[in-house]
Image (cartoon, rainbow, N blue to C red):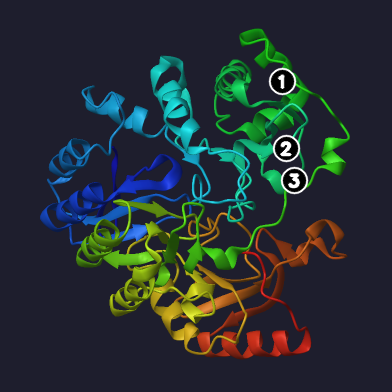
């Protein structure tokens, strides 16, 4: 587990394959954050958790505490460098409703542990980038369909049972290259990883670079050299198959699950919480749920398997903790990176500015504040983005399709530039004007 430097002290990302966190582990993280850091924690858009403000000289003790809690890789007895490499291979995303949703076609939680074991058990895979990411989608009603992944698989009903559509360097919204049998998922991923490493040149760390250089067909052909898996190359799938839409309102509040119980989703304001709040959240999951938390790609958490009779009490407890469980709340519609208080690359204190903006945010508007072009807090293009250009000043972008825009210079990874050098107050006024001119339904973000 790697500790890296930040303006506010050391930073350690705790990777949670599939986003599952045992409440005992949550308590251990909170205790470690108090003992070895300043007690500040963040939830990430990859359904992981970060410990911030790690004190000088405390990195080894923090890492040891996390590994002892079962939060490191399976080969945690290795040397420190090997431990970091193995830990960074666990970028596996599932829906936070995996195993809970009646609408799912398959329980993908049964695939998570074997996939992680395969990733950590092959020495060659230590060469993969820490950012190399996998998605296994079981067809749940709640999923991060707009997060790009190096390899993604999505369940689909088929005459001979559940199959998995798949794609490279993208997401299910981009369309599929073909399908495989559910029984072949682990072997197929393993073969694709070997194919990637076979074809990658020095400096090429992501699947998009390999696809751009060689084409997706070449990657699949090379994968066949490692495992002769039956792949249905059904070109019509790319146009015919569409992953059913999701309802992102399901990430917050109380909703039925398939076990006759409810799950309750919440999120800390701007993804940040303190150790005491994590302790309290874990206690609620212990007392009223199944002893687990599910972290979400929307920088929140789900408490699974809550008894119906306890749901209202849990919701009130979450509110008392300052956690948000209402998708209409302004801070449920606001994303902000760490900002200049913790990141040297940020041009503005985005979290403080986001709190000010939230008090003026028009209804139904979703906005992302980014301190620089890296967009660390959002893996997708938000409906509106405020990109910091100086302390307290932002350029405003609106989501759009640059391929169809007549002036490409007006487009950026964040969309179409609307205005430049806005204060937070001016940005709020501009957002109000834009939404008044173009009424819009609540977007999927």
Chain-order first, disc 2 or disc 3? 2
Q: Alpha-carbon distance for marks 1 and 3?
A: 18 Å
Cβ–Cβ under 8 Å for marks 1 and 3:
no
Q: Residues within 10 Å of mark 1 (few under 14, many from 20)?
A: some
Q: Is residue 203 left or right of residue 336?
A: right
Chain-order first, disc 1 or disc 2? 2
The C terminus lies in quadrant: bottom right
Cβ–Cβ under 8 Å for marks 1 and 2:
no
Q: Is residue 253 above or below residue 425?
A: above
Q: Alpha-carbon distance for marks 2 and 3?
A: 19 Å
The residue wearing badge 1 is 220
The residue wearing badge 3 is 174
Judging depth in this view, the residue of 163 and 9 nearest the camera is 163
The residue wearing badge 2 is 157
Cβ–Cβ under 8 Å for marks 2 and 3:
no
What residue appears at the point 74 percent right and 79 percent down from the top-left corner?
Answer: 440
- Residue 198 position, x and y percent, is 60, 15
- Residue 90 position, x and y percent, is 42, 34
What residue appears at the point 54 percent right and 79 percent down from the top-left corner?
Answer: 328
Q: Secondary structure at mark 1?
A: helix
Whether residue 349 can be seen here: no
Q: Is residue 117 above or below residue 410?
A: above
Foreground mark, 1 or 2, reads 2
Judging depth in this view, the residue of 186 and 66 nearest the camera is 186
Q: Is residue 394 above or below residue 159?
A: below
What residue appears at the point 41 percent right and 54 percent down from the top-left corner?
Answer: 295
Q: Secondary structure at mark 2?
A: loop
Q: Residues within 10 Å of mark 3 (few under 14, many from 20)?
A: some
- Residue 48 position, x and y percent, is 39, 49
Chain-order first, disc 1 or disc 3? 3
């Amino acid at each position: 587990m790697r500790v890296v430097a930040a303006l506010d002290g050391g930073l350690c990302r705790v990777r949670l394959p599939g986003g599952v966190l045992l409440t005992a582990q949550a308590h251990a993280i909170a205790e470690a954050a108090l003992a070895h850091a300043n007690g500040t924690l963040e939830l990430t858009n990859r359904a992981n958790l970060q410990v911030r403000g790690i004190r000088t000289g405390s990195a080894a003790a923090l890492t040891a505490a996390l590994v002892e809690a079962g939060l490191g890789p399976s080969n945690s007895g290795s040397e420190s460098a090997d431990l970091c490499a193995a830990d960074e291979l666990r970028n596996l995303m599932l829906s936070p409703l995996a195993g809970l949703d009646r609408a799912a076609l398959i329980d993908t939680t049964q695939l998570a542990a074997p996939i992680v074991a395969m990733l950590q058990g092959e020495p060659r895979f230590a060469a993969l980038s820490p950012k190399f990411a996998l998605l296994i989608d079981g067809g749940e009603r709640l999923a991060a369909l707009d997060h790009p992944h190096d390899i993604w698989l999505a369940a689909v009903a088929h005459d001979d049972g559940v199959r998995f559509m798949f794609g490279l360097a993208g997401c299910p919204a981009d369309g599929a290259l073909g399908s495989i049998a559910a029984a072949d998922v682990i072997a197929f991923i393993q073969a694709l990883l070997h194919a990637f490493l076979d074809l990658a040149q020095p400096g090429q760390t992501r699947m998009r670079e390999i696809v751009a250089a060689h084409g997706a067909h070449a990657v699949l052909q090379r994968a066949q050299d490692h495992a002769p898996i039956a792949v249905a190359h059904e070109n019509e799938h790319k146009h015919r198959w569409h992953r059913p839409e999701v309802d992102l309102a399901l990430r917050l509040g109380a909703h039925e699950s398939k076990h006759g119980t409810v799950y309750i989703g919440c999120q800390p304001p701007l993804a940040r919480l303190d150790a005491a709040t994590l302790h309290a959240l874990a206690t609620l999951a212990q007392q009223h749920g199944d002893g687990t938390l599910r972290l979400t790609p929307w920088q929140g958490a789900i408490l699974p398997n809550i008894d119906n009779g306890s749901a209202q009490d849990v919701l009130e407890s979450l509110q008392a903790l300052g956690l948000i469980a209402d998708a209409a709340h302004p801070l449920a519609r606001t994303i902000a990176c760490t900002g200049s208080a913790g990141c040297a690359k940020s041009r503005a204190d985005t979290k403080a500015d986001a709190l000010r903006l939230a008090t003026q945010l028009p209804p139904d508007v979703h906005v992302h504040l980014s301190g620089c072009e890296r967009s660390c807090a959002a893996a997708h293009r938000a409906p509106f983005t405020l990109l910091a250009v100086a302390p307290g000043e932002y350029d405003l972008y609106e989501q759009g399709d640059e391929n169809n825009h007549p002036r490409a210079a007006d487009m950026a990874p964040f969309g179409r530039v609307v205005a430049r050098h806005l204060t937070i107050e001016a940005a709020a006024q501009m957002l109000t004007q834009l939404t008044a001119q173009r009424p819009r339904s609540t977007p999927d973000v």
